[in-house]
Amino acid sequence: MTKHQSDISLASSDYLAVLKDFALSRGIQVSDLLAGSNLDPAEFIHPPDLISNFLVNNVGSTLYQKLDNPLCEAVHYGLLVMPSSHGSLGMAIHSSACLKDGLQILERYYQTRLASQTPKIEFDEKHVRLTLNSQVELLEHSKDVQRFFDISTLVSMANNIRLALSTKATDEFVEIDIDAPAPTEFPFEALLFCRFSFDTKKRELRVPKSWLELPFDSANEDLKQEAVRQCETELKRIKPDDLIERIENTLRHHTGALPSIEALAERYFMSVPTLKRKLNQLNTSYIEIKNKTRLERAQASLIQTNHSIERIAEELGFSDASNFTKFFKKQTALTPKQYRSSLSDTN
């Protein structure tokens, strides 16, 4: 297989089969999909179990350019992406006991599908809210193409949750927000259990919180354990098995005030004492990880942007620039302005 920067990011080769079938259903030829992808035709026909996600995205970008109404087609494409199309991760989630169990697996192993994207799972009074945070600059395609992939992924997730629950969840709806205007002829009828909103600030999937512990019809403990073992193997090929790194990754992609330890424990489906104990066993604490990550983000902003101190303080969740300055000076012995000036002096 052709090697790329994308070797850090693996994907199930089943995605290629879905892309191919969908393209053919739209009259797009395989030769057109492969154009400029650096993907060997033999690999397209008989790919290995895991391939570079960048190759999938490259083929997907070509597909996107040939679609007349991409947002509508994202729904139809997402409906083709069944649990098995998500490789071992999809099978692990589909065979889980319930949605709560499946979300733990999703949060833990999502990056076996795409290392440059992380799911953000939050809870409010009525819903489980899921967004996908992508580093588009690492994906080598446009934001519009990423929107196509994200919407199809959210549709796939919504549909697969509904399939796993079968007739158990009939009184409530899944909600999907799309950060683009409503296209003409949008296929609302394709997902009667979904409600779509357009021109929103972000792409988001909301599932009723009441569904969390409803048993999946597809639950199979033996199958789940085997799929999880495969996920673990794939994850170790991509990144270390490290709770600290998981927390750091969550904080790096979080906007605004960083989450409390209570919110983080809920996200990782564990109690606060359990999270504290696990971190203590690793000779650290949440406050230490939070301060380290917050400092890294502050330094990066001071180096890479011309943003004001006030704006950086707001982006990092400080109540004001004064508190940010006190924090930064305690960590580095320099104020943010002094730190930025020192970098300018050395250039």
Image (cartoon, rainbow, N blue to C red):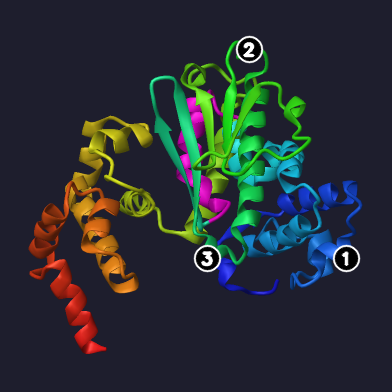
Neighbor class of circle 3 (other Cα within 10 Å; few <14, some 14-19, many 20+) is few
Can residue 285 be seen in the rendering of this structure? no
Q: Position of residue 215 (x, y in %)?
A: 56, 17
How would you classify the magenta stretch by its main secondary structure? helix
Quickly name the residue at label 1. Answer: 31
Q: Is residue 143 left or right of residue 68?
A: left
Can residue 284 be seen in the rendering of this structure? yes
Name the quadrant of the N terminus.
bottom right
Residue 216 higher or lower than 60, as above or below: above
Q: CA distance from mark 3 to mark 2?
A: 40 Å
Type of amino acid under label 1:
Ser
Neighbor class of circle 2 (other Cα within 10 Å; few <14, some 14-19, many 20+) is few
Write down the region rendered in magenta.
95-114
Under tag 2, what secondary structure? Answer: loop
Quickly name the residue at label 2. Answer: 170
Q: Give me the residue at 58% from left, 42% from top.
A: 89
Residue 112, magenta (yes or no): yes
Q: Earlier in the sequence, mark 3 or mark 2?
A: 3
Residue 95: quarter of image: top right
Q: CA distance from mark 3 to mark 1?
A: 27 Å
Residue 56 higher or lower than 182, as above or below: below
Residue 267 higher or lower than 63, as above or below: above
Quickly name the residue at label 3. Answer: 137
Q: CA distance from mark 1 to mark 2?
A: 43 Å
Q: Position of residue 267 (x, y in %)?
A: 37, 35
Under tag 3, what secondary structure? Answer: helix
Type of amino acid under label 2:
Thr
